[in-house]
Image (spheres, helix red, strand yellow):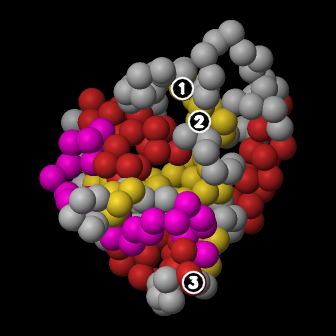
Amino acid sequence: MPLEGRFFVTGTDTDVGKTYVSGCIALTLRQQGLTIAPRKPIASGCLPQTDGSLLSEDALFLQQTTNTTDSLQTICPYQFKPAISPHSAIKQANLTIGISDLVKACDVPESAFALVEGAGGFYSPLALDGLNKDLAVELGYPVILVVANRLGCINQALLSIAAIKQAGLDLHSIIINQLQPKPVQNHALGLTDFTDATIFEIEYANNGQATVIENWIT
């Protein structure tokens, strides 16, 4: 499948709503009749289960919103309990997980639309030998940048945009995620003055349910 059938979702920082936005993207693509294969190859802060396994709530949300038959283990094969960076969790567990391992974990069928979500921001450490950036470069997918509508977001967005371009990647679009109920100041207002990237906005959802992104273009 051509690269326009594959996306890498990253954020300006942690806790900007990448997983929620990924779910909204998935729901939008499903309405276009596409089969989505979600991947979040590594996650920390996972919840212990009664059977001794770990649960990535992000992976579960992606599984539900994409309506995939892929197992949670397929979606997110590397899971860690400590709520720290994946890089630190790997070191703490005395494991050797590199970017090449994460690339393999992102493999999807040619017929499916790959939706890969990173962890943290674009420069956040992701494996022993690399950052989210390095996984994105290896995959070569167009990047979707999630920006939380909060004070300082324009600075963070522009820094991330510069990093994505410096890495030689295509910035597909920017999605402004509304983290608080309105009315709230639109801190992202004016971002269009400094980038020609396509910008979408997702409204606040207090029920956590994914919504379709209006006027979305793949």
Q: Is residue 214 left or right of residue 155?
A: left
Q: Which residue sits at x=41%, y=34%? A: 24
Query: Depth check: 155 or 16 in front?
Result: 16
Of mark 1 and mark 3, the one earlier in the sequence is 3
Q: Is residue 189 left or right of residue 94?
A: right
Q: Nearer the viewer, mark 2 or mark 3?
A: 3
Q: Are marks 1 and 3 in contact (CB under 8 Å)?
A: no
- Label 1, label 2: how far apart the Cα atoms are: 7 Å
- Tell me the magenta residue range: 63-88
Q: Is residue 158 within the magenta segment?
A: no
Residue 140: give x, y in percent of width and height.
51, 67
In the rendering, which numbered label is found on residue 194?
Answer: none
**Mark 3, residues whose alpha carbon is within 10 Å: few (<14), some, or many (≥20)?**
few
Residue 45: give x, y in percent of width and height.
49, 59
Q: Is residue 80 within the magenta segment?
A: yes
Q: Nearer the viewer, mark 1 or mark 3?
A: 3
- Label 1, label 3: how far apart the Cα atoms are: 36 Å
Query: In what element is the residue under mark 3?
Result: helix
Residue, disc 3: 91
Q: Residue 48 occupies which quadrant of the picture?
A: bottom left
Residue 143: give x, y in percent of width and height.
55, 53
Of mark 1 and mark 2, the one earlier in the sequence is 2
Of mark 2 and mark 3, the one earlier in the sequence is 3
Q: Amino acid at mark 3?
A: Lys
Give the residue at the far left of this rendering.
69
**Mark 1, residues whose alpha carbon is within 10 Å: few (<14), some, or many (≥20)?**
many
Residue, disc 1: 202
Q: Are marks 1 and 2 in contact (CB under 8 Å)?
A: yes
Residue, disc 2: 175
Query: In what element is the residue under mark 1?
Result: strand
Query: Depth check: 207 or 119 in front?
Result: 207
